[in-house]
């Protein structure tokens, strides 16, 4: 376990160095204890990286940087992203807490702040549709060139474009029906994307999902683990094809 934690901390240190434009801030002392706690909680490296990214995005918005970022500054964002990831996959807090030392459990139990611009969408439905259409167009342009796949994206984009024209001012039952339809389109697109994966890519994504969830496998019921694994694979497929989330969450 000590070797695994050391490797985890080295990966975090290297990632932080890249984010700091090559300036090395060592993960030692209290910083090592902090990052070791993430490893003990089961925070996947990819999720920790996303939390670090979130901090840097906010840092850049504040203007020119004055000094390199220490990993300690990223703690709240890393735990926020981990909590969002856990909830999205249906991993109960008891499953997460079961593999943590008491100090880490206490930290996780503290109320988390809501990062600016994250979660609880303040984006209007028409604006959401506009963003989705733009991202679908980009996904098509960077896709595999498979005619069937491009046709699927084109049909989804056309339906969404029509929905966007009618979405402004829509309310009540009609609005909910549109939101439900977006969820169906999202599932259908992901299902088609999975079918378009080559066998080697499908196996690689499944392996990555298993690695991401490895820390929780022993503490989760088999059916809960299977659902979480499918959710991770869906996210990885979305990333692989650069697909937007069509569902309005």
Image (cartoon, rainbow, N blue to C red):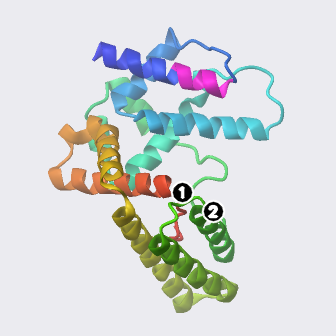
Q: Residue 6, how many percent across, how many down?
A: 39, 15
Q: Quick one: 57 or 193, which is closer to the camera? A: 193
Q: Residue 142, how many percent across, how many down?
A: 58, 58
Does the magenta-highlighted stretch encompass residue 145? no
Query: Marks 2 and 1, how far apart in space?
Result: 8 Å
Describe the element under mark 2 as helix, strand or loop.
helix
Q: Main secondary structure of the magenta part?
A: helix
Q: Quadrant of the N terminus?
A: top left
Where is mark 1, residue-wise?
Answer: 242
Compared to residue 94, the image places residue 226 above or below, namely: below
Q: Quick one: 50 or 198, which is closer to the camera? A: 198
Compared to residue 27, the image places residue 177 above or below, namely: below
Compared to residue 97, the image places residue 200 above or below, namely: below
Q: Residue furthest right?
A: 64
Q: Residue at x 83, y 31 (%)?
A: 64
Q: Which residues are magenta?
A: 13-20
């Amino acid at each position: 376990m000590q070797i695994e934690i050391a490797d985890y901390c080295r990966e975090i240190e290297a990632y932080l160095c890249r984010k700091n434009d090559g300036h090395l801030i060592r993960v030692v002392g209290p910083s090592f204890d902090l990052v070791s706690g993430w490893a003990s909680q089961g925070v996947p490296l990819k999720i920790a990286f996303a939390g670090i990214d979130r901090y840097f995005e906010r840092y850049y918005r504040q203007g020119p940087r004055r000094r390199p970022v220490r990993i300690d500054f990223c703690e709240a964002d890393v735990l926020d992203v981990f909590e969002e990831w856990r909830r999205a996959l249906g991993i109960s807090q008891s499953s997460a807490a079961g593999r943590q030392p008491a100090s880490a459990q206490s930290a996780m139990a503290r109320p988390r702040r809501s990062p600016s611009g994250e979660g609880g969408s303040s984006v209007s439905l028409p604006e959401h549709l506009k963003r989705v259409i733009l991202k679908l167009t980009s996904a098509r342009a960077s896709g595999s060139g498979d005619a069937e796949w491009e046709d699927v994206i084109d049909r989804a984009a056309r339906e969404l474009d029509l929905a966007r024209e009618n979405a402004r001012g829509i309310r009540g039952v009609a609005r909910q029906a549109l939101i439900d339809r977006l969820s169906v389109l999202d599932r259908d697109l992901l299902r088609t994307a999975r079918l378009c994966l080559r066998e080697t890519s499908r196996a690689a994504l499944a392996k990555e999902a298993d690695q991401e969830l490895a820390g929780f496998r022993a503490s989760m019921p088999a059916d809960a683990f299977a659902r979480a694994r499918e959710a991770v694979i869906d996210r990885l497929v979305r990333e692989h094809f650069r697909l937007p989330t069509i569902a309005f969450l």
